[in-house]
Amino acid sequence: MNGDNGKLLIYQVLPRLYGNVSGKNRPGGSIEENGCGKLSHVTRERLADLKGLGFTHVWYTGILEHATTTPYPGITHDHPDVVKGRAGSPYAIKDYYDVDPDLADDPAARRDDFRRLVDRTHAAGLGVIIDFVPNHVARQYHSDCRPPLEEDFGEQDDRGMRFRRDNNFYYLTDQMLVIGSDYGPEPTAYSEYPARATGNDVFHAQPTRDDWYDTVKLNYGVDPDTGETHFEEPVPDTWTKMYHILYYWSVLGVDGFRCDMAEMVPVPFWRWVIRKLRPDFPQLLFIGEIYQPWRYREYLDAGLDYLYDKVGLYDTLVGILKGERAASDITSVWQSQEGLSGLMLHFMENHDEQRLASDFIVGTGSKAIPAVAVSALIDGGPMMIYFGQMLGEHGMDEEGFSGRNGRTTIYDYWSMESMRALHHPVLLSEEQQDLRERYRRLLEVARYPVFHHGLFFDLMYVVGDRLDPRKQYAFLRYRPGCLALVVANFADHSADLALPIPKHAFETLRCPQGKSCRQLDLGTGEEEVVTLESNRPYRIKVRPHDYSVVLFSPLSPYFHE
């Protein structure tokens, strides 16, 4: 769904919250009390708006049926002791083949609602991404929508074996699971015997509240005691089940998968399953959630298309916003990722991270703009925006299971102020309108070919005292026909800079010099004719907490030499 081969721009949205405009927010409230967004709330108009902003894909978070305290006819009831919040975690999957009934206008027709969402999204020219959660399932996993010949997870397990290659779960033999009684209001405690290992690699029977106690770890053929692997053909049973799940959703029109905690699943599985899917779905996207930089290359070599750039660029930019790191530290990020340019998914918000406008980061969305600009323009890799981000969502509500932590809850039924304003524009404040317009302009700039296909050159080593390395960062992007000078200003005062472009930059980028060209400041719209020369200072003005981009383009075809 990216036929122009341009930059991938992904919009992440949690449908449960996206369309809920009730405004009835009771902490820890039920679906009847607080309401819930539906797939039908992602309308053709909303999708057309996203397409107009330049997005290429929508990542719908929380599509698969997961553990919840809300009862539905014909669906196994979840014990509240093993559900996080009233709504439940979208990552405690209860049926890999089904859709969350909360999201359907008619729960009995929930899969039809999803098919219509896929059709609407594709009709808008956007690709569909959903979560693939391969590491763990909900404790009360039961698939009532699996294909007739497909066995359920754990159905054929030998529960007397701590580890057996073709068991789907790890069993803590002769031990009863112990779950704290404060997790839910149910008078009878949840019972699990023998206990199974918890999703975040907890191989004892007493997970804490900070563990992923609502999930069970899946077995891919790795002995947890010895570390020995048993991947020989025929492949472990869990591998085959996961292939069938991915195939099922791909047939339904899903264009890509955001692979939850991909690093907790063996690399050989990824290599096997992606190679097995590619012949039938050659354009299928796989985005891996990985936090161990030393393992990036092995997962990319296994076939994943893009990896989370959390530990590198995200952490650095957040540190700069908080005043804990210098802007010049960005240089070490791209140096450490040499050879991976264009393969890292950049973002400044997602469901795991604190909102930029929260009290924990910068308090207002506008102050984060320079960080978002660097994230969008530094290389040709994909960029992601989280719903509410463009309106400065604060994430400071205390929703229930999710406390006042700067994050938007993924566990509770809630109505976000920013989403109520989005769906009823009369409620948008001037600040929100201004911020959204700034994002619109940034996304427009990010779609220039130079920011997708262009080469990169860091200017920090040559600018010296011409800027403040703690608060400003400057770089070049170049492709034949266009040279871009970008400066991000993290300071609370404006910067009027004269920056040289060194001879080494022209040589490295193979950019011609000594030619007359048009200089265009994308921020002010000011144009003038200049001659591109090495070490000639080029003036650029940057407002507080902002970025500026100056483009140099040819007056004659000789610029393309």
Image (cartoon, rainbow, N blue to C red):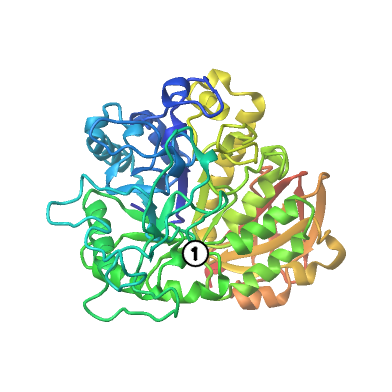
Is 17 on the left-hand or right-hand side of 476?
left
Q: Is residue 151 above or below residue 23?
A: below
In the rendered image, is residue 442 in sight? yes
Residue placed furthest toward the front: 174
**What type is the residue that disc 1 sits on?**
His
- Count of labels in the image: 1
Q: Label 1 belongs to which residue?
A: 453
Q: Quadrant of residue 551?
A: bottom right
Q: Quadrant of residue 37?
A: top left
Residue 526 coordinates in the image, percent (x, y)? 69, 45
Question: Of helix, strand and loop, which one carries label 1?
Answer: helix
Q: Which residue does the image show at 44% across and 33% down from the upper left?
A: 186
Nearer to the camera, 549 or 34: 34
Q: Is residue 29 above or below residue 246?
A: above
Residue 100 coordinates in the image, percent (x, y)? 33, 38
Nearer to the camera, 337 or 4: 337
Q: Which residue does the image show at 57% across and 51% down from the upper left?
A: 210
Residue 295 coordinates in the image, percent (x, y)? 51, 74
Nearer to the camera, 365 or 164: 164
Residue placed furthest toward the left: 149
Residue placed furthest toward the right: 465
Is 159 on the left-hand or right-hand side of 373?
left
Q: Which residue does the image show at 73% across and 56% down from the upper left?
A: 319
Is 329 on the left-hand or right-hand side of 251?
right
Nearer to the camera, 336 or 99: 99
In the rendered image, is residue 486 in sight? no
Residue 540 coordinates in the image, percent (x, y)? 75, 53
Q: Is residue 494 above or below residue 233?
A: above
Count neighbours of disc 1 (C-alpha within 10 A) and say few if under 14, some if 14 to 19, many if 20 or more.
some
Q: Quadrant of residue 108?
A: top left
Q: Which residue does the image show at 27% across and 57% down from the upper left?
A: 153
